[in-house]
Image: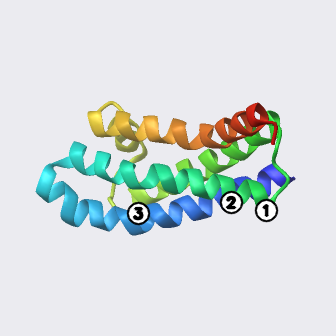
Amino acid sequence: MPALKAGACYFVLVFAAGFLLGPVRELWAVPQFGRVAGLLLEAVVIVPVMLAAARWCMRRQPVRLVPESLGMGGVALALLLVAELCGSIWLRGMTGGEFLRHFTTVPGLISLALFAFYAAMPVMLSLYDRGRGA
């Protein structure tokens, strides 16, 4: 149960940050630098947000072990993918197939890498803490 709560918490925090950064990316960074550079600029901001959010949620819920952190990351990733799919359909007018095909593009591959990093962040923190003896 702690992994479920921590995963939901992690999702809410990172999704909220992404929801705020998305318009900045789309309205400023993409027109200025292009889609790939705009996404990479957003990544520079969102990765530290992922780290801080995962750490904060793991401290609030007793998520310490690798299996628990795997569950936390899995819950957060599942919620994020559902939110991304719904947002793509409702806000961008994409079909499910278009959403999936997006991941065959360079920006889509960058997004997939960020999704994987997002899901792995709790595990990396658990391993780091275990290595430090924390």
Mark 1 and mark 2: span between their CA atoms?
6 Å
Image location of residue 37, percent across then percent down: 22, 45
Give the image quarter of residue 96.
top left
Give the image quarter of residue 52.
bottom right
Residue 85 appears anywhere in the view: no
Residue that badge 2 annotates: 56
User: Relative to 77, does residue 83 appear above or below in the rendering?
Assistant: below
- Amino acid carrying label 1: it is Arg
Asked whether disc 3 touches disc 2, contact meaning CB atoms under 8 Å apart, the reply is no
Residue that badge 1 annotates: 60
What quarter of the picture does the C terminus occupy? top right
Asked whether disc 1 touches disc 2, contact meaning CB atoms under 8 Å apart, the reply is yes
Image location of residue 25, percent across then percent down: 28, 60
The label nearer to you, 3 versus 1, is 1
Q: Residues within 10 Å of mark 3 (few under 14, many from 20)?
A: few
- Amino acid carrying label 3: it is Trp
* Mark identifier at residue 97: none
- Amino acid carrying label 2: it is Trp
Image location of residue 9, percent across then percent down: 68, 61
Q: Residues within 10 Å of mark 2 (few under 14, many from 20)?
A: some
Image location of residue 116, percent across then percent down: 53, 36
Mark 3 and mark 1: span between their CA atoms?
33 Å
* Mark identifier at residue 90: 3
Give the image quarter of residue 98.
top left
- Per the image, label 1 sits on a secondary structure element best described as helix
